[in-house]
Image: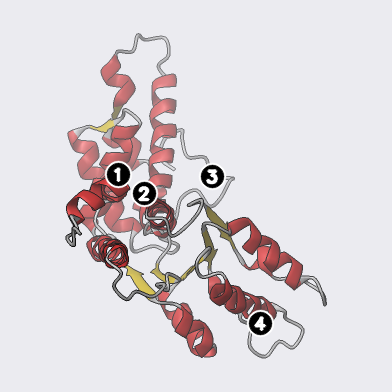
Amino acid sequence: MDSSIDLEASFHASGVAEVLEQLDSELIGLRPVKTRICEIAALLLVDQARRSLDLATEAPSLHMSFTGQPGTGKTTVAQRISQILHRLGYLRKGHVITVTRDDLVGQYVGHTAPKTKEMIKRAQGGVLFIDEAYYLYKPGNERDYGAEAIEILLQEMERQRSDLVVIFAGYRDRMTAFYQSNPGLSSRVAHHIDFPDYSQNELMAIAELLLEQQQYRFSEKAAEAFESYISRRRQLPFFANARSIRNALDRLRLRHANRLFSRRDQSLDREALITIEAADVLASRVFQGEVEGTDPAKPLTGGQD
């Protein structure tokens, strides 16, 4: 009997290598997160190898906690994890159902259980991703039914651990308090993964990657201006990492289009159509210390705004 296992062959045959490569290419940075995902994949591959040789194994607990600021890639990583678990045979479907408190908690007696169970049913064979999970717990409010949703989740996380993975996500400090409020919940979450904020250089790399995907590019001076934009925007309220960068690029494209449209009587070449200029960046209110895009009464185009 052949008692050896080729892990490299198993790794590539499973398709997990392809998913990890995709994760690495679509998300800038996040090295600690990517390392942890690789470690989980390695554990599962080794477990499968042990099982094939009749060595002792036990069903791994795969429920997870993602903590970090908005826009740090938590939803994308959840999607890739679901694909990895599907390709390794731990999940039947490998889809992700994203929910918040409103999808799970009812407003009157008898409403919460069917809502929560319906979301769990939809997620079976895949991942239930609960965003801002700490809102499920509201201490001191006797008329709140979030605790009921948590109890149902706890039961199903244990009962369906071979057919359902639950990922709780939210701000780091609030998630810590959430777990402290319910030790039973914390004990069922095997993998706690923290998503760091992106650095200045990583945010710039994200911007350039997103522009390239949309067939735009910065001029040299526009790139310098956008680096200054990032530095300023990070100091203002409601900064959401890559999400804020994506929103900023949407506004840049509006300004770029408005600038070109303002001289529509002139012919445009390819270079003009793809190049973001410094003026498109510097028109942002961020350079005046304001968060742009929050006041619909203030246009994003048409000169300095």
Q: How far across and down, in percent of the image, does residue 101 sit? A: 63, 68
Which residue is found at the position 65% from the left and 76% from the top? 152
Type of amino acid under label 2:
Ile
Q: Are marks 3 and 2 in contact (CB under 8 Å)?
A: no
> Is residue 78 at least partly visible in the picture?
yes
Q: Is residue 253 above or below residue 142?
A: above
Q: How far apart, in angstroms, are the residues tagged by discs 3 and 2? A: 20 Å
- Look at the numbered disc 1 and give the secondary structure of its residue: helix
Residue 151 drawn above or below residue 34: below
Q: If you read the primary sequence from the N terminus, does the residue marked by circle 2 or circle 1 appear first? A: 1
Residue toward you, 7 or 236: 7
Helix or strand or loop: what does disc 2 sit on? helix
Q: Pick whichever of labels 3 and 1 is earlier in the sequence.
A: 1
Res 245 label = 2
Mark whose residue sits in front, 3 or 2: 2
Residue under numbered circle 3? 298
Dot 4 amino acid type: Ala
Q: Residues within 10 Å of mark 2 (few under 14, many from 20)?
A: many
Of badges 4 and 2, nearer the viewer stands 4
SS for dot 3: loop
Q: Amino acid at mark 3?
A: Lys
Residue that label 4 marks: 147
Q: Residue furthest right?
A: 109
Residue 134, quarter of picture? bottom right
Mark 3: few, some, or many residues within 10 Å (few <14, many ≥20)? few
Q: Quadrant of residue 136?
A: bottom right
Circle 4 packing at 10 Å, graded few (<14), some (14-19), many (20+), is: some
Q: Position of residue 84 (x, y in %)?
A: 37, 54
The answer for how far apart the CA atoms under marks 1 and 4 are is 41 Å
